[in-house]
Amino acid sequence: MRVRSWLLKPLRVLVLVALAAGSAAITAASLAYFGEDLAPFVVEKLPLPLEDVWMLALRTHVVAAAVCLPGCLLLILGGVVRRPRLHRWLGRVIATAVLLALVPSGLYLSWFAKGGGPSTVGFMLSGAIVATAMVQGVRTARARRFVEHRRWVLHVLAQLSVAVTSRAMLIAFDAAAVDEQLAYLVSLWVPVVGSFGLVELLCPRTRTRTAPSTRRIHEAPVDARPAPVLAYDLRRAHGG
């Protein structure tokens, strides 16, 4: 167990740093969407039926992503978790941005995704996972079911990280001269499905323990003497 913790801690830090750096790089590259000249990515999409609406959705998505992914990374840091008020308000800001800006704009943009139908379905699946997980994350936090809450917010973070892992895969495929269409689909679907599966593997669903039946309680032998371990614990609790 000690060896496992010793290995997982630096790996966790490395992943968080890589995601933060990737998010910053994507945000910096996306600044071109706010200039007067059309970026190459936008030119590829032309002509569009509602160009102004598409540009608004794109810019909304870029701004929301620039806030949500770093915000999710902050929310899982120990220093933020140990400050309930800060964690709560930051979580509310991120949840609002995800549900009212990031997901709606992403779903609209997915209709015009490169790669046609398979890409559209992939982006919609990721958006559905993010929206569902965020709603459940808010519900479990309000119900103080913090183990479930952690699992749901990790699903949100995992899907938001797809933007970084997908971009890294595209760069690798381009260097290897892989077919552009195939590379785009693989770089989308593998991170989406893989991120979901990884969270499910690391954070399995909690099972609710059933309470013992009344019959068993009444049939249990009554012993007025406290168990030795319990008596020892009570003495420790009262300073004995």
Image (tube, helix red, strand yellow):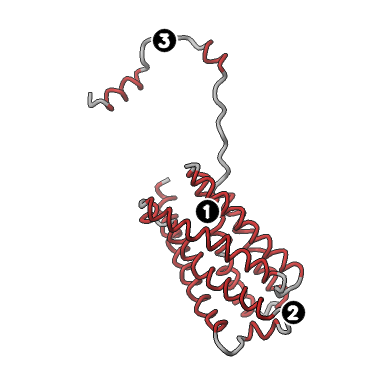
Question: Mark 3 touching mark 1, by CB under 8 A?
Answer: no
Q: Which mark is residue 49?
A: 2
Is tag 3's residue or tag 2's residue first in the polypeptide sequence? 2
Residue 162 location (% of width, % of height): 59, 65
Q: Secondary structure at mark 3?
A: loop
The image quadrant that residue 225 belongs to is top left
Q: Residue at x 36, y 56 (%)?
A: 79
Tag 3 residue: 223
The image quadrant that residue 237 belongs to is top left
Q: Secondary structure at mark 1?
A: helix
Say what amino acid the circle numbered 1 marks: Val
User: Label 3, label 1: how many angstroms apart (C-alpha)?
Assistant: 46 Å
Q: Residue at x 61, y 53 (%)?
A: 132
Q: Residue at x 56, y 34 (%)?
A: 208
Say what amino acid the circle numbered 3 marks: Asp
Query: In the image as oriented, which residue stretches furthest toward the bottom?
Result: 37
Tag 1 residue: 153
